[in-house]
Amino acid sequence: MNTYRVSCPAKINLFLHITGRRADGYHNLQTVFRLIDLCDTLTASVSAAQRTRTTQQDTAALDVLDLVRLTCDTPITDDIRSNLIIKAAAALLAHAYQTLSPDQIATLPVINLHLSKRIPMGAGLGGGSSDCASALRLLNIIWQLQLSSPELQAIGAKLGADVPIFIFGQDAIAQGIGEQLTPIDLPPQRFLLLMPDDHINTARLFAHSDLRRDCPTLSLHDIDQRQADYLDHMNAPFGNVFEPVVSQLSQPVQAALNYLQILSTTTQTTARLTGSGGSVFLPLPKGIDNKTLQNWQQRAPCRAIVVPTLDATPLIEKI
């Protein structure tokens, strides 16, 4: 039985702007994504079990749940079909129907997927999107669909705005709804990451009257050249438009930000929200000893970890 494993990293947004609303109702964004070494793990095993339908005549009615079985070490969505991993599998199965012969579809193997979670859900860290991207990458290999990275990114963008960055697999400037990605060369960083146990519905945030939606569109050149204005510090015009809104609506997030702002007098860096929250982070300069970092984590008002950046999305391992 062939088994594959891949780490699914989290991301942070160094800044996050909304530059306008599109005709389709989505918002245009500008942000810089960083991948960080906080990872879920997705394991895929080719099952020896027979799927529900195996004959060539039945392939037209083949359902994604005939081919993919998902387990998780924490509770997952009540409706398994609403899980992003299953949605990823369904999207690839739909592609297979367009590109493979009935004989090839009839031989697609059943896959057992198991997800081990470390990234909290609804925390602005992209955990569900990263898991979805990893499922796309794994199933593309196991089902031998031979889709390119840009093709997988296009499929992923239809499943979630943050999915493409995890297939793209490196730090990037993002535009559009998050699917237009340009690589950016950033220095390694470490962050003190706080994860309050509070989630505010994203639709509620986008509908909030205080949310700024008219940030000026910056050129890719400006974003690249002005890294000093958003890496360790946050200088105008950079910021996260969701931060003042989430701070209004969530006392736990505000408490976490307040805590990091106290520490920032030592680090001389800027605490901020990632994504639409509720996780917050503080860039850490070199020279802060481990004892101090441990003390800061212990005193934090919620779960706190020190996390470094990643150069790239981890490779898929065959085990």
Image (cartoon, rainbow, N blue to C red):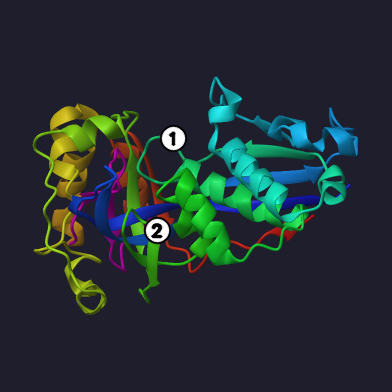
Looking at the rendered structure, the secondary structure element under dot 2 is: loop
Which label number is shown at residue 121? Answer: 1
Q: Magenta span covers which residues?
A: 269-290
User: Residue at the spot x=19%, y=33% of the render?
Assistant: 207
Give the percent coordinates (x, y) of residue 267: 21, 60
Question: In the rendered image, which quarter contains the C terminus?
Answer: bottom right
Q: Secondary structure at mark 1?
A: loop
Disc number at residue 182? Answer: none
Q: Identify the amino acid type marked 2.
A: Glu
The residue closer to the viewer here, 147 or 230, is 147
- Residue 310, can we see it? yes
Q: Marks 1 and 2, how far apart in space?
A: 21 Å
Choose the circle earlier in sequence order: 1 or 2.
Answer: 1
Q: Is residue 18 left or right of residue 51?
A: left
Q: Identify the disc placed on residue 179.
A: 2
Image location of residue 109, percent across then percent down = 83, 44
Residue 48 in sight from this viewpoint: no
